[in-house]
Image (cartoon, rainbow, N blue to C red):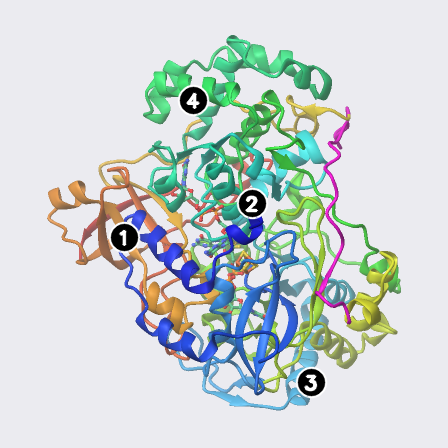
């Protein structure tokens, strides 16, 4: 049996794995009884019994390749594509339960127009169904009115990067494109940009070849990110040691050889002391450091002050443990510190970018940057961009100041990102100018830090357009809601960045005909442009041509690729380790000269947490995600809901007992900005001073019949910032500081 076959797991086993892992982490989950019953209808299935359509999973950016089984016009089963080099023919639970979202009766079916001018939480928008013609015309007229009266910058675009929509925004003349990454991974991005890549962080880890995996929160097993999980489990089967620092016993911590419950927001002290030990004891990879890095002498001098004894005071981890981990890490090659997104080096703390800097330094000291067992830099095929394929006419002049202050970010402003932590303040104070309208796609109002304040900002806008597949909270605040197809109804291809040494392209063909009167994002954008009188910006443009031209640059075409027998393009190649890096010196810059040039500290100097616990707020907040859910995408999914229906205030059992709080009892969790009500979940696996809350719940939109009214939104507790306050954080990674907040808990 090949390795691939040996480790292949079917859907039922996978669900069991996910549930088992949840229990191991101390979060009690009920076993979904009806999943088994439903499987009777779906399985066994082979390629003769059903039509097989290639697709890739659209739940997260992993885009794992799929074979979709269609029987009598219904999608009956999704399987991992066995030829997929990234996901190795396996899918995670979030992909499997997507069929239930495709057929969700609550899905948006037709464009909607608000008839109730009053807006707010719980206010009925009194939607009426309208035609696409009326919807597009209403949007175009209103956008033109606002543009005339207040300027193009009064219209904001909130969505992930998309060339069609960005062109419409530039044609309207707005600099206000707001995306979410400063809540997700800009801190790691900044450190890797300055020190290694000149552009972004690596997403591919060769962890299956690691011998020692050290995670600062990185929950590679718990997030069910398919490829990460496979890499870590493969490595562990081959004898690798897994060590996890996390204030909460996450799923990965629960499976680790060693779990270290570090004080939240202090990991930088731990890594600084590791650097101290490794350099002092000369345990580093001298050849790699000599040949591929610059700034070692500066780091050596700088690290002398950060002794393990000093770090013990900050982290509450004994000095001898720090010393032992440092030695193990340096003496068990190849060793690596992976950092995905919202772990300790993600945008949770004021020191997160600095922690990411130390992680680059440590990985360089043990020689696992773009080397087997470490993080691998992107090797994606290069394809022409939208502007190269469809050169645009000249765009109008526009103001450069933005509503979120992103243009002031010395390094990060070069990325299509934006600041979700400052946008509410800008809109509500009309600073530097009024923003009257927004077009939002694939974001919810519950996504923003201080979500209630952002909800107010959305409610006060003159005109809000939302592109959605479900009647979300943001849809409830909108003037026009436009329904998009579910990803199983769409087509296209993905150039996957995650976890494949040489990314294969994956093909997506419509698995199901359009169930409802929906339109895709590109089409919607071009129709709005046409009606606004901006049609010249899209002359000759089409989604089909865009795909075709990009594929032609790689030596294939849409015509050819769409007939591909396995829906994949590209082969595995041997790793050719990089000899130079994209920094000013061409070396890995341990001393970040780019940060220095931009006015930041080039070395990861320790500074205190923004907020320390106090008598009034005696707990720290850490955030997690349930492995069966993808934030706001899956709460209305009946399978995911049965396994994980709500979130809890997860707290230390002994502390709760002392406070007279029982398991399952309702508590009020309060921060300096607001409070939420949750049931308490008492576990042993969490620090006494920490509360863990899962993100994605607290859905107040009544149209979500499964999800409505369950749990609460952690984002109601998280403070937002003014642009001025944010600049004072002086963070090259512009992280939103999602966990720099302390909490109080009392009985409800
Ligand atoms: N199933 C599932 N998978 C997902 C998602 C999902 O919604 N569901 N979302 C995707 C997305 S968008 C993202 S960004 C990623 C996020 O995935 P990860 O990057 O793994 O981040 P989190 O889920 O927030 O988990 C981070 C862990 O860090 C711990 N932590 C918090 N503060 C500290 C600290 O100060 N020190 C240390 N050492 N640990 C700390 C938390 O307790 C938590 O266990 O997951 C992706 N994958
Ligand atoms: N409080 C708090 N806030 C957070 C986080 C946290 O942990 N806590 N995490 C942050 C992170 S890491 C991230 S990545 C962001 C993610 O923030 P979001 O992107 O807002 O989260 P999602 O839940 O993935 O998706 C949002 C919406 O997209 C809709 N959707 C799904 N498919 C489609 C589609 O095909 N078309 C359209 N138009 N809409 C679709 C879903 O129905 C859902 O309502 O949130 C950030 N905000
Ligand atoms: S990791 Fe899971 S949710 Fe993400 S694309 Fe792959 S199967 Fe889908
Ligand atoms: Mo994220």
Pointer 3 or 1: first along the chain: 3
Asked if the residue under mark 1 is in contact with the one under mark 4, i.e. CB atoms within 8 Å, the reply is: no
Residue annotated with mark 4: 325
Pointer 4 or 1: first along the chain: 4
Q: Residues within 10 Å of mark 2 (few under 14, many from 20)?
A: many
Mark 2 within 8 Å of ligand 1, using the beta carbon: yes
- Image position of 26 (left or right of 544): left
Pointer 4 or 3: first along the chain: 3
For the residues marked 3 and 2, what is the alpha-carbon distance in whole angstroms?
Answer: 37 Å
Residue annotated with mark 2: 185
Snapshot quadrant of residue 245: top left
SS label for mark 1 = strand
Residue annotated with mark 1: 649
SS label for mark 3 = helix
Residue annotated with mark 3: 137
For the residues marked 4 and 2, what is the alpha-carbon distance in whole angstroms?
Answer: 26 Å
Q: Is residue 201 above or below residue 355?
A: below
SS label for mark 2 = loop
Residue at screen point 64% across, 15% down: 296
Quarter of the image where the C terminus is located: bottom left
Q: Looking at the picture, how far across and down is residue 686, in whole percent?
A: 28, 41
């Amino acid at each position: 049996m090949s390795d691939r076959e040996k480790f292949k797991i079917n859907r039922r086993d996978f669900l069991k794995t996910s549930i088992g892992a949840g229990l191991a982490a101390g979060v009690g989950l009920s076993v979904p009884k009806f999943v088994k019953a439903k499987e009777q209808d779906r399985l066994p299935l082979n390629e003769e019994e059903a039509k097989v359509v290639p697709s890739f999973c659209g739940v997260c950016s992993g885009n794992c390749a799929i074979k979709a089984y269609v029987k009598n016009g219904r999608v009956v089963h999704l399987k991992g594509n066995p030829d997929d080099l990234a996901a190795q023919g396996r899918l995670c639970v979030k992909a499997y339960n997507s069929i239930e979202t495709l057929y969700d009766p609550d899905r948006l079916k037709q464009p909607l127009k608000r008839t109730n001018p009053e807006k707010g939480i719980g206010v009925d928008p009194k939607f009426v169904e309208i035609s696409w013609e009326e919807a597009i015309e209403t949007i175009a007229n209103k956008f033109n009115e606002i543009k005339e009266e207040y300027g193009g910058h009064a219209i904001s675009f909130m969505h992930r990067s998309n060339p069609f929509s960005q062109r419409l925004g530039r044609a309207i003349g707005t600099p206000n494109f707001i995306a979410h990454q400063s809540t997700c991974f800009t801190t790691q991005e900044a450190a890797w940009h300055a020190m290694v890549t000149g552009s972004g962080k690596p997403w591919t880890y060769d962890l299956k070849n690691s011998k020692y995996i050290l995670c600062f929160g990185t929950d590679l097993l718990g997030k069910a990110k398919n490829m990460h999980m496979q890499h870590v489990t493969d490595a562990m089967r081959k004898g690798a040691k897994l060590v996890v620092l996390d204030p909460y016993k996450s799923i990965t911590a629960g499976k680790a050889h060693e779990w270290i419950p570090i004080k939240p927001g202090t990991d930088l002290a731990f890594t600084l002391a590791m650097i101290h030990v490794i350099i002092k004891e000369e345990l580093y990879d001298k050849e790699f450091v000599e040949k591929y890095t610059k700034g070692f002498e500066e780091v050596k001098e700088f690290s002398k002050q950060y002794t393990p004894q000093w770090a013990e005071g900050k982290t509450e981890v004994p000095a001898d443990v720090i010393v032992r981990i440092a030695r193990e890490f340096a003496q068990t090659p190849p060793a690596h510190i992976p950092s995905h997104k919202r772990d300790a080096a993600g945008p949770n703390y004021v020191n997160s970018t600095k922690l990411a800097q130390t992680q680059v330094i440590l990985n360089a000291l043990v020689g696992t940057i773009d080397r087997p067992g470490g993080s691998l830099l992107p090797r994606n095929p290069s394809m022409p961009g939208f502007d190269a394929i469809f050169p645009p006419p000249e765009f109008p002049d526009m103001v450069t100041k933005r509503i979120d202050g992103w243009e002031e970010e010395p390094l990060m402003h070069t990325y299509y990102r934006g600041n979700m932590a400052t946008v509410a303040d800008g809109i509500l104070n009309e600073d530097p100018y009024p923003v009257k309208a927004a077009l939002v796609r694939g974001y919810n109002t519950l996504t923003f830090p201080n979500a209630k304040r952002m909800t107010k900002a959305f409610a006060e806008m003159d005109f809000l357009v939302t592109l959605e597949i479900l009647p979300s909270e943001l849809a409830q605040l909108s003037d026009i809601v436009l329904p998009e197809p579910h990803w199983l109804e769409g087509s296209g291809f993905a150039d996957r960045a995650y976890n494949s040494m040489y990314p294969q392209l994956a093909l997506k063909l419509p698995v199901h005909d359009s169930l409802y009167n929906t339109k895709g994002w590109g089409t919607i954008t071009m129709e709005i442009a046409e009606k606004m009188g901006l049609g010249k910006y899209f002359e000759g443009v089409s989604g089909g041509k865009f795909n075709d031209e990009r594929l032609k640059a790689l030596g294939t075409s849409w015509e050819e690729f769409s007939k591909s027998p396995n829906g994949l393009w590209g082969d595995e190649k041997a790793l050719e380790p990089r000899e130079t890096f994209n920094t000013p010196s061409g070396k890995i810059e341990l001393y970040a000269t780019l940060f220095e040039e931009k006015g930041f500290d080039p070395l990861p100097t320790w500074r205190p947490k923004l907020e320390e616990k106090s008598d009034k707020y005696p707990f720290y907040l850490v955030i997690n995600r349930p492995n069966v859910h993808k934030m706001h995408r899956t709460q209305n999914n009946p399978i995911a809901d049965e396994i994980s229906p709500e979130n809890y205030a997860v707290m230390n059992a002994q502390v709760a007992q002392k406070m007279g709080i029982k398991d399952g009892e309702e508590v009020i969790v309060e921060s300096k900005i607001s409070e939420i009500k949750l049931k308490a979940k008492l576990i042993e696996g969490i620090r006494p001073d920490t509360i863990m809350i899962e993100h994605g719940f607290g859905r107040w939109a009544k149209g979500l019949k499964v999800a409505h009214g369950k749990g609460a939104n952690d984002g109601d507790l998280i403070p937002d910032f003014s642009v001025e306050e944010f600049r004072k954080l002086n963070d090259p990674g512009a992280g939103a500081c999602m966990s720099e907040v302390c909490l109080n808990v009392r009985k409800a």
